[in-house]
Image: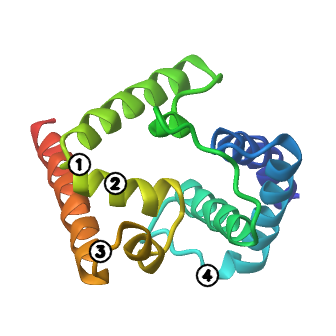
Amino acid sequence: MAFAALFRHYAPRIKAFIMRGGADADVAQEVAQEALVMVWRKAASFDRNRASAATWIYAIARNKRIDLLRRGVRPPIDGEDWLAVFSPQEGGADTSISAAQTYTRMKELMGGLSAEQLVVIRKAFFEDKTHTAIAEELALPLGTVKSRIRLALGKLREALAREEGER
């Protein structure tokens, strides 16, 4: 009964999340179902001290999407506005406003990264490429790719921490 309620709540949201990533409706439905089956199987491993339930569920869905992409079904990402994958979509007013604010803020934060950092972040997190694949594609040493990602994430983390401190 509780899982049915969880499924009714999260299945359409996960499907929309995956579709915003460029997948078609059938693929997104498959990913949503696989993710929620994984939630059922791994429920005992959930730790509320590490993340909220929603964060945990969306992380599982994201990982299922990555698995799908690695199997060779890679949806296209618009090269001009790759952050639009996570742009606000339809929903309730509160959700829409929050999503719009998050999208705008993330776009601002990403704009503060160097071009080199932005390229590796884009490839790692938006194109779901491994560090090794990024290094090969950009003809860079693996350590350089890892350093750029680490530094970029550090900059983003610092900016978010500053904002939290100002509130």
Label 1 and label 4: CA atoms lie apart by 38 Å
Which residue carries the number 2 mark? Answer: 119
Q: How dense is the environment of label 2, judged by Cα within 10 Å: few (below 14), some, or many (20 and up)?
A: some
Q: Please identify the quadrant where the N terminus is shown.
A: bottom right
Mark 1 belongs to which amino acid?
A: Ala
Answer above or below: position of 53 versus 159: below
Which quadrant holds residue 56?
A: bottom right
Q: In the image, what residue occupies the spot 70% across and 49% down?
A: 75
Mark 2 and mark 3 in contact? Answer it, CB < 8 Å: no
Give residue 58's quadrant in the image: bottom right
Disc 1 to disc 2: CB gap under 8 Å: yes
Q: CA distance from mark 1 to mark 3?
A: 15 Å
Residue at coordinates 25% horizontally, 57% vertically from top-left?
117
Q: Which of labels 2 and 4 is toward the front?
A: 2
Q: Which residue is mark 3?
A: 140
Using a 10 Å C-alpha cutoff, classify the residue at mark 3 as few (fewer than 14 neighbours), some (14 to 19) or many (20 or more): few
Percent position of residue 102, x then y: 39, 34
Q: Which residue is mark 1?
A: 115
Can you tell which mark lies on residue 45?
Answer: 4
Residue 164 shown left or right of residue 3 in the figure:
left
Q: CA distance from mark 1 to mark 2?
A: 6 Å
The reply to whether the C-beta atoms of the residues labelled 1 and 4 are less than 8 Å apart is no
SS assignment at label 2: helix
Q: Are marks 1 and 3 in contact (CB under 8 Å)?
A: no
Mark-to-mark CA distance, 4 and 3: 38 Å
Sequence-wise first label, 1 or 4: 4
Q: Position of residue 36 (x, y in %)?
A: 78, 62
